[in-house]
Amino acid sequence: MKRALEREKRARKEAEKILEEKSLELSEVSQKLKVANRLSSNESLSMAESELNFSFLPEAYIKTDLNGSVLEMNQSAVEILGFDIRVSPINVTDLIYRDDYLYAVNSFKSLLKWGTFSDYVARVYVKQGPPKLVHINANLIYDDQNEPSFAEGVIRDITEKSKVRKFIEEQQAELSSIVNYAPFGIILTERGTLKKFNKSFQEMIGYSASELNGMDSLKFILPEDIERIVQVQNDMDAGRIKHGDFLQQLCKKDGELVSVRVNVTTIPDENGLPKYRLSVIEDITEKVNQSALVQEQKEQLETIYEHSPLGIALSDQGRLMKVNQAFCDLLGYTAEEVLALTFMDFTFDEDLLESGRGYQRMIKGEIDKFTLKKKYIRKDGGVLYAKTNISAVRDEQGNIKYEVVVIEDVSEQESAERQRNALMLQLERSNQELNEYAHVVSHDLKSPLRSVSTLVSWIKQDCENLSDTDVHKNLDLIEATAERMEDLINGILTYSEISSGVEREDFVSVDQVVRGLIETLYIPKHVELTIAKALPRIKADEIRVQQLFQNLMSNAINYCDQKQGKVEIDYIEEGEHYVFSIRDNGEGIPKEYHEKIFGIFQSLNTDENRESTGIGLSIVKKIVDLYDGEVYLDSGVGVGTTFFVKLKKPF
């Protein structure tokens, strides 16, 4: 911007010099010829006056007939135009620039009508070089009968003057653009009063142009800064400093403060005395706020670092550089003691290999961090079990600058993990023993039951000829009770065999499983069992899926007490799950039993003709839990029951 001001100043001086020279020339011409003055007036010349010799005029002079043919021209005209009538004839129409032709025709018409024209400015062709810009004053010459006979005029070459003016205008436009569109505020003051300012300053300070014009610059400055700013101004006025560069806050129109960096320069007058002050003002509010935010975050991080319950350390290839208090407390050392050690000094030998492998991978650039559990040797000889996170901080070349190590005391978790593993092992043994016990009990109970069934069968054969119906009825009751007892034993055995882990999984078509059960289950004639649509595949053990739907379908069939029983199997998609439904129009289940019925040996059966062990729904619940699913129902007395089974889709 300063260079642009200097260019404008030089251009202005050149223009003033040219104007001064031309003024002297005009003064000489006005003294030599009064006739030349009359050419620039509204007075027309007579034939007698036109006989004067104009060769001495410094301006170019030409005389033409009314058709434009040049009759006379002085040396100045020859120099400007490059043409000479002594060499070849000339017509002024040949000199008119193409784009100015209409303007020239209208000017000539004006000359014929009024006898004169002045301040004609247009471009003309010259013999050599580009067209020139000329200024022409012209008059008509009349004969004795006052009829126009000739035209004459004075031509001034204003090409260079126009270039200078254009250069100045371009420089002014350039400077104006720089000032107005600069991303920082620019103000020019005289004795503290604003003379000029750009748009950025207006937007920065919040005042309109009319409000800022003539305003005292001290109005924006905070009272506590005035003395300091005035001292800078006094130092500049006294010549002790040429420039001022300082930070301050300005008060905007709405009272808000804006942080700025000010660079101020004194502009002297022609005598070298201070006249103006040019100030460039940069809004650094965001930078100041960011700096404050960074400082605040730094303090927060330092607070976290110092008060974190996790041990934090910076190390360089295992050598400790900085540690927080928690790190010292966990290992039982003071900060001075621990900084004199390396990680190898309190690491067990069996953990060195694993941590060494991770560190080598970090050096190679394969990873930037790794985590491991390791034991640390405390100062008192105790053992600290800790989860250790090691992260690499790299320089611009990608080399490890230092490591950030975070250790978390997991001694309690480690102890709890050992206890849990012991309990799991004990539970596994208990489950195994229970399964073995269930098989033994099942075998031991089934043997006498089979004997009872065999004896009852023999007794029924022996009593076939007896007419006592009570005997036959009691024998049938004994036989049915034995069969129900065997079903109960089989149910207990099945329930005990459903382990807490899934032994095998495969894609199972629920549709095929259900259709196979329809073929094998006993479905009374009054019950209609339908599948609403093709059922999807899931990933599970096919035997478990069969047990699940067999129990639900059997339950629905058994409790259809309507003359026309209906059982419908359907499903919907719910996010990442399938929700299967088994709906019946049976007697329904009271709400208070909706949870209880999933317990083992829980049955609502009050009809002796229905077979129910009270184990079926508990088997369903155990299988669904095995696959992290849900089983629930919607039912009411007299409105039927719908069981819902929610299982994951096979992704």
Image (cartoon, helix red, strand yellow):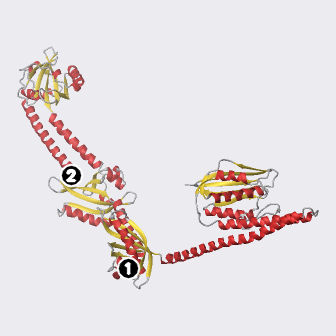
Image side of residue 27 versus residue 504, left or right: left
The residue depicted at 60 percent of the width and 61 percent of the height is: 627
Query: Which circle's residue, 1 or 2, is located before the other in the chain?
Result: 2
Viewer can see residue 309: no
Query: In the figure, 231 relative to 174: above or below?
Result: below
Question: Which residue was labeled with disc 2?
Answer: 2
Residue at image point 64% right, 55% down: 579
Quarter occupied by residue 398: bottom left
The image shows residue 327 at horizontal and vertical percentages of 40, 77
- Going by the numbered disc 2, the residue's amino acid type is Lys
Amino acid type, callout 1: Phe
Vertical placement of residue 440 versus 531, above or below: below
- Return the residue found at the far right: 467
> How far across and down, in percent of the image, does residue 387 sit?
44, 73
Q: Is residue 24 left or right of residue 113?
A: left
Where is residue 525? Give x, y as percent.
Answer: 80, 50
- Residue at left offset 62%, top offset 72%: 432
Mark closer to the observer (1, 2) = 1
Q: Residues within 10 Å of mark 2 (few under 14, many from 20)?
A: few
Distance from Cα at disc 1 to Cα at disc 2: 67 Å
Task: Name the image quarter holding the C terminus.
Answer: bottom right
The vertical placement of 459 against 635, above or below, is: below
**The quadrant where residue 378 appears:** bottom left
> Residue 165: which numbered mark, if any?
none
- Report how many numbered discs are placed on residues in the image: 2
| Label 1 neighbour load within 10 Å: few <14, some 14-19, many 20+ | some
Residue assigned mark 1: 346
**Residue 450 found in image quarter:** bottom right
Image coordinates for residue 424, horizontal then vertical, percent: 57, 73
